[in-house]
Amino acid sequence: MKKRILTFIISLLIIVSPLAAAANEMIEDYLDIATSYAVSGNYASAMDYLDKILSIDPSNKEIVSLKMTLKNMQSGNMPSPVVSQNRNLVLAEQAKLAGNKSSEIQYLTQAANSGGYWENMFAGDFFRKSKQFSKAIPYYEKALNSTTQFSTPLLYLGICYFEMNNYNEAFPILTQFIAHNQQESYAYAMRARVLTEMGRYNDAETDIVTAIALEDTIEYRYLEGLILFKRGNFKKAQTTLEKLTNQIQTSDIYKFLGLSYYATGDLNNALINLDKAILLSDDDKTLQTQYNEIKAKLVNQGQNK
């Protein structure tokens, strides 16, 4: 990925060593993603990527210094330079703190209409976080078209289209993002979700395995279990989902675990897990029907012995 000028770091007079940034492509990718998150105010995600850089290059003093700066920004002791340099964004931030959503979006859209990349990203983020995905899309598109430096809008566009169930639009956009950010685990996981909805389970499994190789999280393992279930690999789905039940106790995980056991003929474990799923569900009649079906089969087996 082409090395970029880190505008927010320059604004803070923090200079990232060219040698450190160019140490390898993975560090540069992580630095690009951290930059995008940091300038948009998502300091927690930026911190995650700076930590990834330090896991590769622990002696990088510039990254350590940058982490300290972001901590100050995250705590509110130092404003984002992008926000502080735009009056409409300052007013939007004040409206947000006051809980005035109508004024917040008014100032955000004013900033976007007369601004460039970051102003449009802020407006897009507002609508995306408000689950108004169709309204977020034009702002992310404007952000994308305003610069060749950042590919982050592609990820958010892909997420918006996914949430709108428009998988045919989401897939190529996420693929384009991944081409520029091959170490971004979340993008592979998002594309795996899209592929699952498209019924392309083999490709979905490839993507989620890649995501796990880059970053092993509970969420990715859970998605892997669901994809394995959808693929019909019930034994492997059982193994994957069973390992997660100590950390995830939802109706869905017990539902898919129970149905996996049912598919392999283990009626006792199927019944146990579907019973847990029913207790945690909001009156899911389909679950109750499946539970009764399995229970009847167990009764018949007992009678035939």
Image: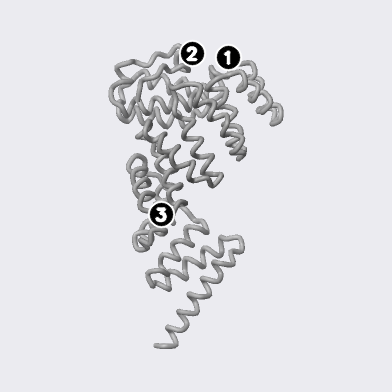
For the residues marked 3 and 2, what is the alpha-carbon distance in whole angstroms? 44 Å
Query: To which quarter of the image does residue 63 belong?
Result: top left
Asked if the residues shown at circle 2 and circle 1 are in contact, with their CB atoms under 8 angstroms apart, the answer is: yes
Location of residue 101 in the rendering, given as x and y in whole percent from the top left corner: 69, 31
Location of residue 20 in the rendering, given as x and y in whole percent from the top left corner: 31, 19
Question: In front: 247, or 208?
Answer: 208
Can you say whether 63 is above or below 301 in the image?
above
* Tag in front: 3 or 2: 3
Q: Which mark is residue 227?
A: 3
- Which residue is label 1 attached to? 85
Q: Is residue 98 left or right of residue 182?
A: right
Residue at the image position 41 percent from the left and 88 percent from the top: 304
Colour scheme in use:
one colour
Helix, strand or loop at mark 3: helix
Query: How many labels sit on residues?
Result: 3
Label 2 neighbour load within 10 Å: few <14, some 14-19, many 20+: few
Q: Is residue 196 left or right of residue 283?
A: left
Q: Is residue 127 left or right of residue 147?
A: right
Helix, strand or loop at mark 2: helix
Q: Which mark is residue 288?
A: none
Query: To which quarter of the image does residue 130 belong?
Result: top right
Can you say whether 270 is above or below 72 in the image?
below
Residue lying farthest to the top in this orientation:
13
Of mark 1 and mark 3, the one earlier in the sequence is: 1
Q: Amino acid at mark 3?
A: Ile
Of mark 2 and mark 1, the one earlier in the sequence is: 2
* Quarter containing the N terminus: top left
Residue at the image position 44 percent from the left and 22 percent from the top: 148
Of mark 3 and mark 2, the one earlier in the sequence is: 2
Residue at the image position 45 percent from the left and 79 percent from the top: 298
- Which residue is label 2 attached to? 11
